[in-house]
Image: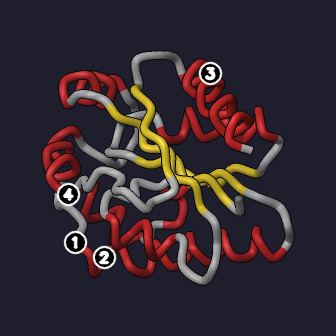
Amino acid sequence: MDAIVVMGVAGCGKTSVGEELARRLGWQFLEGDGFHPPENIAKMSAGIPLQDEDRWGWLDTIAAHIVLAREAKAPIVVSCSALKRRYRDRLSAGGTRVLFVHLDGSRDTIHARMALRAGHFMPTTLLDSQFAALEPLEAGELGIVCDIDASPAEIAARVSSRIARAA
């Protein structure tokens, strides 16, 4: 496996789980939001959902980092919403083996978590558009679904355990 992408809607815990998972595995962690161009951040901050055209450059930048990690034989964990199958296909193009870890939770749970976040550009008003865009993992995709019913450390432990069993 070249990379793990911790995916899901805004507020599901991608960063917290991704950081802990990377720590457990001894892999580097990349925060996907850090690769958004300023235009995307401005749109989301203004409550405007991103469209596919807004996401392609962002996804290509993340995919390039995954390829570089593969070439360096230094696997990475990345947080990235990866809401649609075509986005996940883009992230795993070029022969990279990417495991997608979908953090799944109810709208109410995630909305409550988002409301508690301070200083994040993604407003709670965009949550419904995130759920509308979400395409669950499909047969043929390398991925697992994890409920967000536990702490990030517990979720990361579950994921790393499943990875170890599959290896």
Taking the spot 45% from the left edge, 67% from the top edge, the residue there is: 36
Mark 4 is on which residue type? Ala
Location of mark 4 (residue) = 133
Q: Nearer the viewer, mark 1 or mark 3?
A: 3
Q: Residues within 10 Å of mark 2 (few under 14, many from 20)?
A: some
Instruction: Look at the image and tell me in which quarter the N terminus lies.
Output: bottom right
Describe the element under mark 3 as helix, strand or loop: helix
CA distance for labels 1 and 4 = 10 Å
Q: Residues within 10 Å of mark 1 (few under 14, many from 20)?
A: few
Q: Residues within 10 Å of mark 4 (few under 14, many from 20)?
A: some
CA distance for labels 1 and 2 = 5 Å
Q: Position of residue 87 (x, y in %)?
A: 38, 69
Specify the label residue 165 is tagged with. none
Instruction: Look at the image and tell me in which quarter the C terminus lies.
Output: top right
Q: Quadrant of residue 54?
A: bottom left
Location of mark 2 (residue) = 54
Describe the element under mark 4 as helix, strand or loop: helix
Q: Nearest the camera: 126 or 68?
A: 68
Vertical arrangement, residue 91 with respect to residue 125, above or below:
below
Describe the element under mark 1 as helix, strand or loop: loop
Proximity of marks 1 and 2: CB atoms separated by less than 8 Å: yes
Specify the label residue 51 is tagged with. 1
Task: Indicate which disc, 2 or 3, sits on the residue closer to the N terminus.
Answer: 2
Mark 3 is on which residue type? Ala
Mark 2 is on which residue type? Asp
Location of mark 3 (residue) = 153
